[in-house]
Image (cartoon, rainbow, N blue to C red):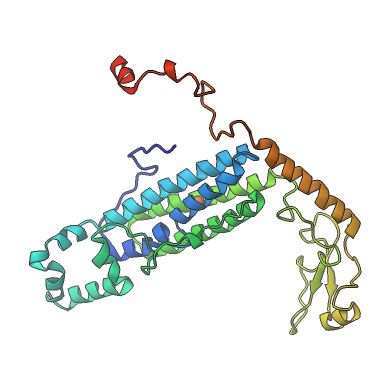
Amino acid sequence: MFYHVKELQFDARVSSPDPRFATLLLEQFGGANGELKAAIQYFLQAFAARKPYPAQYDMLMDIATEELAHLEIVGATITMLLDGINGELKDAAEQTLMTEFLKGPGKKEELLQQAIVNPQFFALSGGSPTLTNSQGVPWSGTYVDANGDLTVDIRSNLASESRAKLVYEYLLQFTDDPQVKDTLTFLMTREIAHYQMFASALDSIQPNFPPGVLQGDPRYTHTYFNMSDGGDIRGPWNQGRGAWESGEWVYVSNPRDYVEQTDGLTNAPVEGTTETRESTDAMNRQLGQQRSTEVKSAIQSDPNQWSKFADGSRSSSASVPHVEERVKSK
Ligand SMILES: [Fe+2]
């Protein structure tokens, strides 16, 4: 159930109208890294998480709902930045916008600049946000990543929050309005906070690597192929333990020879790890069973019920007063 409160989460203000910045800000309303994308992404991910991971489900729904609150803040800011435009457009008989073109070179230049950014925006929206990005491209469900595996989904969210943070950082450079800057700084900061929430949530699921259930083939997990010439640079991504919990990288400096010598890698030795094909097979079975049990044991039957209400059943409907009776008794 959703319940709307009319006041914004953050007291968004605008010093003066700025249609050009309103157009840019659409990027965070209906763009690929915007607030609607984030809200829908976490909302969608929450369905599969609800039963096996009730704690992380609670977090996903809290953040999804906060993103909707941010969508509202962005929409309100866009509307305030456009205040006056709607009124001008409604004065169709006066053809205000057209007559502005005739009021001298300065005004004409300004209007042309606004039109260059996104001409349809002014023609279609009439002074309120449109569900598009700053270039007028409609919002799309393909922006949303939800894979039904919580560790995969949370990793997508870390990337989403990083991109959203960066877009706010860029947007901050295109406005001088201190009030708008305050709002953008708030929104940017919440992306940082969300990133840390998701990082902690990922850590709370163990094991969480590799994503999903199946382990990698130990013949290939710890191998680094030097696939380009022009300097063999070594770093933690191809040397030492790197991000591995155990084992270390095996650097193949000449992949052409290596592939040939190992019959197209089919006879590649297990190197850099103490895992064996037998141990990873056993891990696959154990983890598969664990994850399957987590999901199955979370599913109720007779009936499979999404919510639990205080009275625990619907069988006692006779004792529930009619709506009018409840209103009268208030
Ligand atoms: Fe966020």
- At x 50%, y 57%, the residue is 165
Q: Nearer the viewer, residue 201 or 182?
A: 201
Q: Which quadrant of the figure has residue 123?
A: bottom left
- At x 64%, y 45%, the residue is 201
Assign the C terminus to one quadrant of the image: top left
Q: Nearer the viewer, residue 51 or 7?
A: 51
Residue 49 visible to an observer of this rendering: yes
> How many discs mark residues in the rendered view?
0
- At x 40%, y 51%, the residue is 71
Q: Which quadrant of the figure has residue 197?
A: top right
Q: Is residue 50 left or right of residue 291?
A: left
Q: Is residue 161 above or below residue 257?
A: above
Q: Is residue 263 left or right of residue 78?
A: right
Q: Nearer the viewer, residue 184 or 289?
A: 289
Q: Position of residue 185 (x, y in %)?
A: 43, 53
Residue 274 visible to an observer of this rendering: no
Q: Is residue 315 left or right of residue 232?
A: left
Q: Position of residue 43 (x, y in %)?
A: 51, 47
Q: Most extreme residue toward the left, as rendered?
A: 93
- At x 31%, y 15%, the residue is 329
Q: Position of residue 242 (x, y in %)?
A: 78, 61
Q: Position of residue 23 (x, y in %)?
A: 33, 64
Assign the N terminus to one quadrant of the image: top left
Q: Is residue 19 above or below residue 98?
A: above
